[in-house]
Image (cartoon, rainbow, N blue to C red):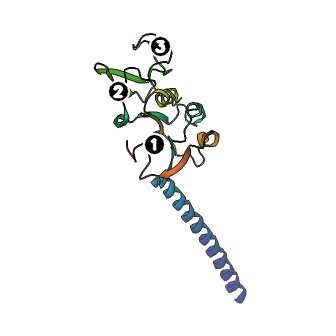
Amino acid sequence: MDDKKQIKRREFINTGVRIGIGVGLGAIGVVLSTRTLSGKSVWQIDPAKCVQCGKCATSCVLEQSAVKCVHVIEMCGYCDLCGGYLRPETKELNTAAESQLCPTAAIARKFVEEPFFEYHIIEELCIGCGKCVKGCGAFGNGSLQLQVQHKLCVNCNQCAIARVCPSEAFSRVPATAPYLLKGFENKK
């Protein structure tokens, strides 16, 4: 009879330990998945550090990069000769493909009044190459900036673009303030 009690006691202890380990692992899994799903932190590009190297367009794990150009309209000068829209060697200031800097025609130009134009990013066409951002920063006021679009980003544990970013412009930011726009705090 004592043998049966010892076996039952051992079984009880073994079962208790297994259940404890299972519950512990389950709790850890729930905490980690909740932390990821609640988005306590997300990846973002610091426009002040970004050098528009083009790696955002080619290094994202998604087929089309989650990095897109964002136009901070509050900073825009509505330039006639927009360095983010037109190629530097443009002969005519028009919307012809050979005049446009963007390789996918992701920037729409709309006449406002002489000599002002309004620019909009067509997100579906933007590949995150940064050519327009580089042009806007070189000849304008930097109203075109690259940002990770969180509705597209899968929030990888280790961002593939962050690993290859030469300027270390990628960092984790709070999900409550997911955008880092140069000159403005948490807009978009």
x then y, percent, for residue 50: 54, 38
Which structural element holds mark 2?
A: loop
- Picture mark count: 3
Nearer to us of marks 3 and 1 is 3
**Residue type pointed to by label 2:** Tyr
Q: Residue at point 59% right, 39% down?
A: 161
Residue occupying image coordinates x 49% and y 18%: 87
User: Mark 1 vs mark 2: which is more N-terminal?
Assistant: 2
Residue extending farthest to the top is 91
Residue 101: horizontal and vertical position, in percent?
49, 20
Mark 3: which secondary structure?
Answer: loop
Relative to 44, 162 lies left or right: right
The image shows residue 63 at horizontal and vertical percentages of 55, 31
For the residues labelled 3 and 1, the Cα–Cα distance comes to 35 Å
> On the rendered structure, is 56 left or right of 114?
right
* Residue under numbered circle 1: 150
Label 3 amino acid?
A: Thr
Q: CA distance from mark 2 to mark 3?
A: 18 Å
Badge 1: residue crowd in 10 Å (few <14, some 14–19, many ≥20): some
Left or right: 87 as drawn, with respect to 13: left
At 59% from the left and 64% from the top, the residue drawn is: 25
**Contact? badges 2 and 3 (CB < 8 Å):** no
Q: Which residue is mark 2?
A: 78
Residue 156 or residue 99, whichever sits in front: 99
Figure quadrant of the C terminus: top left
Among numbered discs 3 and 1, the one appearing first in the sequence? 3
